[in-house]
Amino acid sequence: MSDAPAAEDGPARAPQRLRVQPDVDLAGNSPTVGNRLSVGLRLDEYEVSGVIGEGGFGIVYLAWDHGLEREVAIKEYMPSSLATRTATLHVSITSPTHADTFALGLRSFVNEARLLARFDHPSLIKVHRFWEANGTAYMAMALYKGRNARDVRQERSEERRVGKEC
């Protein structure tokens, strides 16, 4: 996803709060809200706290790691154009014609997680753990708070536009 926090050039800015998209299942009666996992749902030792971002191939959740008592980001392979979530949390393809594409994407997701988990470098996201469950895969990652690349690009574009108007 392109919503990774961006490095900043220039003056230091006050830290920004992480924007979490609200969960519409306020009663807590459903394990899912559309294709999203509901707030409060447990995935092993992780408890979903909200949605950070959503793209064509996955959803990134804010979660609490009960084992290590820290916030993490959990990325889930959930290609919305190929699959949907059932009431039992299982991710299922929407058509048999999507089976090969879904399987290839899932394999790529797991390979990416495995590769990232091997590295410890400031330019790469730190993957703490990855696993397969519910017909899909997940990776628990370090949570980096701050502005994402899209917001930085938009802000810089607006600054250039305002500068040209002066």
Image: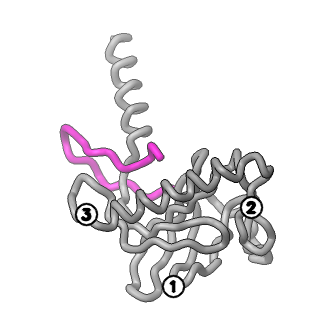
- Which kind of residue does numbered mark 2 sit on? Ser
Percent coordinates x, y for residue 35 in the rendering: 71, 59
Residue found farthest to the top: 165
| Rendered view: 41 above or below 18 | below
Under circle 2, the secondary element is strand
Q: Quadrant of residue 129?
A: bottom left
Whether residue 3 is in magenta: the answer is yes
- What crowding class fits label 2: few (fewer than 14 Cα within 10 Å), some (14-19), or many (20 or more)? some
Numbered circle sitting on residue 45: 1
In this image, 115 relative to 105: left or right? left
State the CA–CA distance, disc 3 to disc 2. Answer: 31 Å
Q: Give the foreground label among 2 and 1.
A: 2
The residue drawn where x is 50% and y is 73% is 131
User: Is the C terminus in the top left, top right, bottom left or bottom right quadrant?
Assistant: top left
Numbered circle sitting on residue 92: 2
Q: Earlier in the sequence, mark 3 or mark 1?
A: 1
Whether residue 102 is in magenta: the answer is no
State the CA–CA distance, disc 2 to disc 1. Answer: 24 Å
Numbered circle sitting on residue 115: none
